[in-house]
Image (spheres, helix red, strand yellow):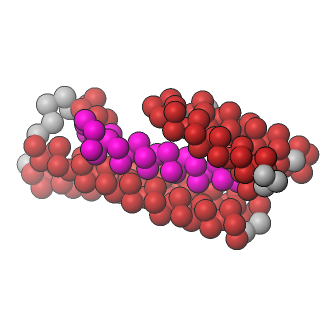
Amino acid sequence: MLAALGWPILVFVLHDRLGSWPLLVMGVGLLAWRVPQARRLAFGVAALLLAAGIMGHAELGMRAYPVAVNAIMLAIFLASLFQGMPIVERLARLREPDLTAAGVRYTRRVTWAWCGFFIINGTIATWTVFHTDLAVWTLYNGVISYGLIGLMFGSEWLLRQRLRRSLT
C-alpha cells in the first residue's frame, strides 16, 4: 500500500538506479493490485501502460501511473452515479444507515465533485507527464496532488458540518 501511495517518490529515488522498464513493470503490478473494485479496468489500463513501454516509451508508461489512477477513480465514481448507489453515499451509509433524502442528494453532489476533482487532477498529472522533468512530476504527483486530496476531504468535511448545523 505504501508503495502505491508513494509511487512518484519511489520513482524519483529509484529511476537513476533501475531505469524506466523495471519501474514500469512495478507500476503496472501496483495498478492491477491497487484497484480491486475495477480489476478489469485496471488490467486494461495497465496493458496500455505496458504497450507504451513496448513501443519505446517506458518512461512515459511509468510516469502515466498517476494519470491511470485518476482515470480509474473517475470511472469508478462516475459509474456509481448511474449504477446502484453512488460511492460517497455507500461510505456515508456506513456511518448513517438511515440517510435522509437530503443526505442522499448531498452525497450524490459530493460524488460529482470528486469526479470533477479526478478530471482536473488527472489533467494536471497528464501535463506533468509530457511537459515537466522527473522532479516536477514527482513534486506534483507525489506531494501536491495528495495535498489537494486532503484539501478536498477537509473542505467537504467542513461543509458537511456547516450544513448539519444549519439543519438543526
Residue 4 in which image quadrant: top right
Q: Quadrant of residue 28?
A: top right
At x 65% / y 35%, what residue is drawn? 30
State the image coordinates of residue 140 (x, y, percent, origin top left): 63, 61
Query: Can see residue 93?
Result: yes
Say whether residue 10 is visible: no
At 35% across and 48% down in the image, what residue appears? 78
State left or right for residue 119 relative to residue 61.
Answer: left
- The residue at 74%/36% (across/down) is 26
Confirm whether the magenta stretch covers residue 65. Answer: yes
Left or right, 88 with reference to 31: left
Q: Nearer the viewer, residue 59 or 165?
A: 59
Q: Nearer the viewer, residue 72 or 45?
A: 45
* Magenta span dominant secondary structure: helix
Q: Examine the rendered structure and indicate whether residue 141 appears above or below residue 75.
A: below
Q: Which residues are magenta?
A: 63-89
Name of the residue lying farthest toward the right: 17
Residue 141 in the image: x percent, y percent? Answer: 63, 56
Q: Nearer the viewer, residue 134 or 151?
A: 134
Q: Position of residue 80 (x, y in %)?
A: 32, 41
Relative horizontal placement of residue 93, taking residue 25 as reference (left or right): left
Q: Nearer the viewer, residue 94 or 77?
A: 77
